[in-house]
């Protein structure tokens, strides 16, 4: 049965990525959801809404048409945040996975409406610049669809400021929490783990020294480039 | 034997909920107790006093008459906090489970005698407003019964301010710790986990920005409503 | 063989208590030691020095004569802190177990040379008053025996101020860390776990509100008495 | 096969030490690497670059010639930080193991560009003095080789100030994180665990009391000497 499911691998990746978020402690209760897109097939797969991680199965992962937003496979309601995920996939085909959590330190920066400054190489290894905070949705946007408005607000923020979402794969929603993305669901989960670690260290650093200086630009560039640049030399050749 | 116990299911729920509180790290040593009420049967079931979680069994869960406060089943002394639990059940029949812990961040707000402000959607998803701190018991109340006075003080606080305990299922006792409740023991445990997460993030947010603004009212309402309102669309239909 | 060891039970308790300290996360690497005294037999048993917890066995627990400080059983060197433990046992026969750790929050108060104030009932349930910080050893005391001087300094601090060590079973050594005790090794471990939780919550409370008021005396008394007073009603009768 | 590998034991030690760093929670994702040197054989062994801990095997540990920096055994690329490790081994033959992590509290001090002060005996037991922060690499050094420049900068810092790296086996790279070393890979891992604990307690201590005084020199000396001095009496004789 599962053998003949054309979305089996995509759903399996999404199941594994959701469990990885839970195992990393980023999502107490059911506060998190991960999706992955298959841009060629024109679909994404996402966690069902409000289902405890312990009872998640491949069959319960919901498959959605990227253009129409309709459910293509699965009997459960998809995550309420699905319209936000869809907006990100429609925006940039370089985005293959999206993670939403309420991970505590990143959420605290979102609640403080303070961008996470780039204070070190851990940050620069994953994110080319400070993690921005978007604006709030307007009353009108809340009326017409909170979750899709959220997606639009993220894209608007990056477009207006000329930020490349592939180089800076994370954002904070004010008074809410982070959205993180990546080339794949797995890569997006790594970025979500990195974001929480970076947020914890930024909070601790600012506690030790409120005027802590940012990482010098030349070092930020060296670190990002050795992992992601054209002459990257981090990791194994076959993995590039 | 256990089959013929009319309270077997209630006691099993209470046992599971107490272990869930322990597993969530909210109750080091024996600092926590969970009860559940069966309002139709006129009883509640609660953890025995001072018994380590590792040795808890269904049979040791104590069943209490909601009206008289007498032990109906069980050979152990009930939790010393039983009178507080009883006061909550007698107050509002919408309360089906009560949790008391000394979870560290919520307790720190209780010790600071500072309400936990609603700084984000994580908070608004569970609690419709800031988590209040009650007054201290008076010397006379300490004389006549500390634990039942505590229950009365909680009810008084909510009644005097017109707060609906079903929409705001948590309170802080000054210099002591939180009481949390819910529709069931299981739901009360989820709320207790949420409260501790919300308290940790509030402390961190206030550390980053002492004047962090509260969540705008319209967003708080949207988040509470999508989980708990008449047109709630979070979670699965069958689970509603 | 072990059957005929007259100290077998004492050593087993000490082994279990040392592992409990490790499991509670209070002693990274080998930074901790627990002993227990058998005042009737005139001995105490203690962890060997610098032995990783993973390789501890009953046979490696060292038995010491309380009067002479000589090793009575065991082939290993006892903990370097043994003279401090001995001083406590010789001081008060109500002390049946002693724990030394570098648990992080209690140690941070010791490093800040700041007593841990009694800010809540969690504290009052275990300790009748703030946790004091002793003076430093003098250069002469360092010359003649650092660890025995440490024990004398603790006793001196409590005697000079008329503090009852049975009601206040913990102390902080400045720039060092806590010593905690109790009726038994097991009870001392519970007190050490409570001390670390209380220290963490005090640090968090003071971060939220630097002038947080102490627990009112009448509440402190009620809480200590319901656990430890002549009419204690916490816990089960058989356990009293 | 493995039997005939002359570097089998060295590689096994390095594998175990890398896993110990992961298990201690010092290296989320792949943010850490441990090496060990065999100065007689003129080689060191190190983690391959960017390989997840779960898939590490003895065969994937890379062996490097200490003089030439060439790979002697192994099919993977060595850690990108290899030139830093090599600089430390070439500097001092008392260094038998090197650990690099982004452990959160030590990294926060590195990001704050603030040395970790010696505030207590936990610190003095492992490190004879405050943990220094080096300078940044210059633009020229970034051009000619970031990682080897990093190693030179560490050695330069210690040499210029007359600090003995055997007595003070750790350093912070500004906006980056710690490098820690020791007599062996295993000893370096213990020092890395100690450094993170010491950094966490220093941050907490400074939060409680910004002007916390350092450990008195005479106590620092006593503690370091009882573990590392000529008359050390900590630990077991056979282990010395």
Image (cartoon, coloured by chain):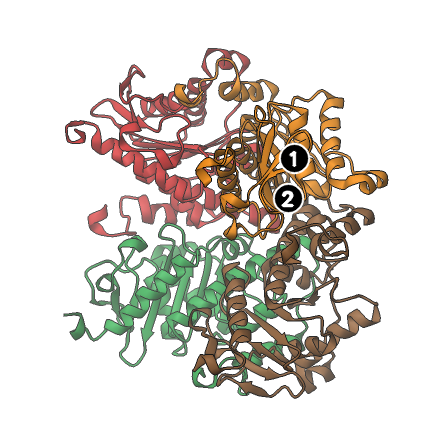
Chain colours: A orange, B brown, C green, D red
Residue D136 image label: none
The image quarter containing residue D18 is: top left
Q: Chain of mark 2?
A: A
User: Label 2, on which residue?
Assistant: A79
* Residue closest to the eye, A152 or D122: A152
**Residue at x 30%, y 44% (from the top left corner):** D229
Distance from Cα at disc 2 to Cα at disc 1: 10 Å
Q: Position of residue D36 (x, y in %)?
A: 30, 31
* Residue closest to the eye, C149 or B43: B43
Res C123 visible: yes
**Residue at x 85%, y 41% (from the top left corner):** A139
Q: Position of residue B101 (x, y in %)?
A: 59, 66
Query: Callout 2: 10 Å neighbours few (<14), some, many (20+)?
Result: many
Vertical position of residue B49 compared to residue D128: above or below:
below
Q: Chain of mark 1?
A: A
Is there CB contact under 8 Å for labels 2 and 1?
A: yes
User: Label 1, on which residue?
Assistant: A85
């Amino acid at each position: 049965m599962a053998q003949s499911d054309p979305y089996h691998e995509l759903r399996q990746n999404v199941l594994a990525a959701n469990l990885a978020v839970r195992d990393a402690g980023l999502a107490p209760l059911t506060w998190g959801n991960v999706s992955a897109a298959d841009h060629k097939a024109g679909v994404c797969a996402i966690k069902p809404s409000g289902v405890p991680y312990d009872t998640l199965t491949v069959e319960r992962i919901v498959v959605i048409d990227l253009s129409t937003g309709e459910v293509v496979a699965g009997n459960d309601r998809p995550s309420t945040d699905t319209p936000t995920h869809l907006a990100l996939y429609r925006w940039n085909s370089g985005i293959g996975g999206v993670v939403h959590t309420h991970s505590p330190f990143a959420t605290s920066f979102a609640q403080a409406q303070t961008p996470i400054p780039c204070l070190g190489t851990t940050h620069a290894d994953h994110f080319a610049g400070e993690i921005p905070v978007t604006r709030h949705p307007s009353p009108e946007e809340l009326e017409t669809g909170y979750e899709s408005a959220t997606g639009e607000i993220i894209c608007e923020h990056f477009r207006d400021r000329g930020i490349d979402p592939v180089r800076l794969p994370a954002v904070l929603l004010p008074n809410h929490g982070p959205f993180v993305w990546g080339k794949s669901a797995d890569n997006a989960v790594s970025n979500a783990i990195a974001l929480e670690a970076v947020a914890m260290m930024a909070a601790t650093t600012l506690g030790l020294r409120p005027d802590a200086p940012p990482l010098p630009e030349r070092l930020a560039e060296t670190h990002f480039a050795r992992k992601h640049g054209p002459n990257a030399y981090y990791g194994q050749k076959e993995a590039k």
